Each structure stands twice: as C-alpha cells, then as structure tokens.
Amino acid sequence: MTENGLGIGKAILEVMGSVGYVQKQSASGLQYTYASESALIAALRPAMIEAGVFCYIVEIPSIEQLPYVTSNGKAMNRTIAHGIVRFGHPESGTFIDVHAMGEGADIGDKAGNKAATGLLKYALRQTFLIETGDDPDQHSSEDQERITEKVIGGSGSAANAEESNTTKSGWPPAFITELKTQEIVKRSDHAGSLLNHSPFDENAKLEDVMRWAKIWKARRADGLKTTEAASVATEEYRTSQ
C-alpha cells in the first residue's frame, strides 16, 4: 500500500467506523455462504460517499491465463490477476494505492472479469477491514491444534487422533469414509482438512461433495497446490450447475 498524504487515511477511518460487518449470502444450488462484491459495495458506498472516498482499478501489472481441461473434459479458462486499486479523496487531493490479487475460472470468456471482480472485492474488504466471518486459516489451524493436542497428550495413537479430529470437525463419517474409499485421500485427518477447504457444510449431499472432491483431485494432478486446487474446483463445480 502506498499513500500520498493524510486526508485519505482519515477518510478511510471514517468509513471503517460506519461499516464493520457484511452479512454473507446463500449461493443458489450450493451448500455454502459468501460475501459478494455487490454486498460489499452496497454496504460501503453510502459511507464512502459520506466520507468523500472513491475507488477504481488503476492498473493491472500482471495477468496470467491458464487454460485447462476439467475431469469431465470441458475446456476451462483460469485467470490470475494482480491489480492496483486506488482509493482517492478529492477534497484533500490525496490517495492510497492498494495491491490485491484476484482469480477466476470460466468455461467461456468471463475468467478475466471474475478475476478483476475478485481483486476489487478483496481490496475493498481488506482496506476497510470488513468482517464477514470468513477466515481462510481458521479450519486448518484448528484441525492441526486438535491433532497435536491429542498426540502430545498421550491418549491413544496417531490414528485415533485422526478419527478424533474428524469427529470434532463435525463432518459426517460417511464423507470421510467415501473420500478414502474413492482414494481421494488416504487418511481421515486429510479428509477433514480437505472438506474444510470445500464450499460445503455437514448438511451437503454426499454426491455433491464427491463430485467436487474428484474435480479437486484432478486439479491436484495438474500440479496445483491444495488451496489453489480447492478454489478452482469450487469454480468448476459452480459453473457446472
């Protein structure tokens, strides 16, 4: 983040004082909720106008196009964009430039648009510190702590620790069993961690979870890291609905 003057900083603090939380929305056909760009803008616009703040994407220094084929044989386009979003304060003539990343996948020509939408969304969210209840580190960190406590405590074996972790995470045993049966993962703790990266909750249909998991496995086979594969799998799953 770069700054030119103090006026914009004070204006941003005013917006932060007015807007602190954005309610997540349900996604049609999917078992998860999310905070959309439109919801962030709807919540922030009145406060930004009141504080005299505007923003726009001033530059996209880098953009990467990564075409790939889904497990169903569909050609997909994946775009990763690094953008600079400028927040300006006309009254003082000051501004800050915020760097953000956006990623999008689409079967047609909308991957770039989705990536741009994503980078603007996260620039807004992080600049004004908007709480939505989403924490990308929440599940994996808690899972690791539960496993560590179980093993260090000396109560049972590592395998028992894995099963305990599965139970505490709230995922139905059928999910864990099927992921291992289908050889998506080999261990129960790995299954729980993977499910924590999915767009589903414990009330999802097993067939939907497995369809997403198979896409994830295919993306992992393409060389993507776990979190990247999960993100792309979610986009593919959503597109296929």
Image (cartoon, helix red, strand yellow):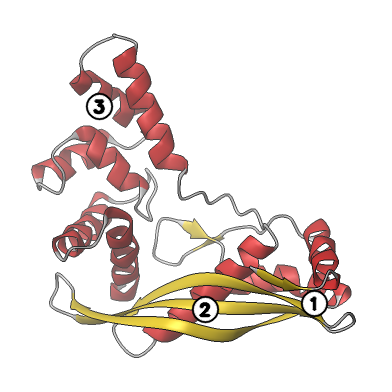
In the rendered view, does 95 fall on the left or right side of 119? right
Q: Nearer the viewer, mark 1 or mark 2?
A: 2
Amino acid type assigned to the residue bearing label 2 in the image: Gly
Seen in the picture, residue 227 relative to 94 is either above or below; the reply is above
Above or below, 129 against 154 in this view is: below
Question: Viewer-proximal residue, 110 or 154?
Answer: 154
Identify the mark at residue 83; answer none if there is no mark: 2
Farthest residue in the bottom direction?
A: 109
Real-space CA distance between mark 1 and mark 2, rounded to the nearest whole angstrom: 19 Å
Q: Residue at x 39, y 82 (%)?
A: 63
Quadrant in which the N terminus appears: bottom right
Label ID, residue 162: 3
Residue displayed at 34% across by 11% down? 153
Residue for badge 1:
53
Q: Position of residue 194 (x, y in %)?
A: 28, 46
* Dot 1 amino acid type: Val
Q: Earlier along the polypeptide chain: callout 3 or callout 1? A: 1
Indicate the quadrant containing the C terminus: top left, top right, bottom left or bottom right: bottom left
Front-most of 62 and 225? 62
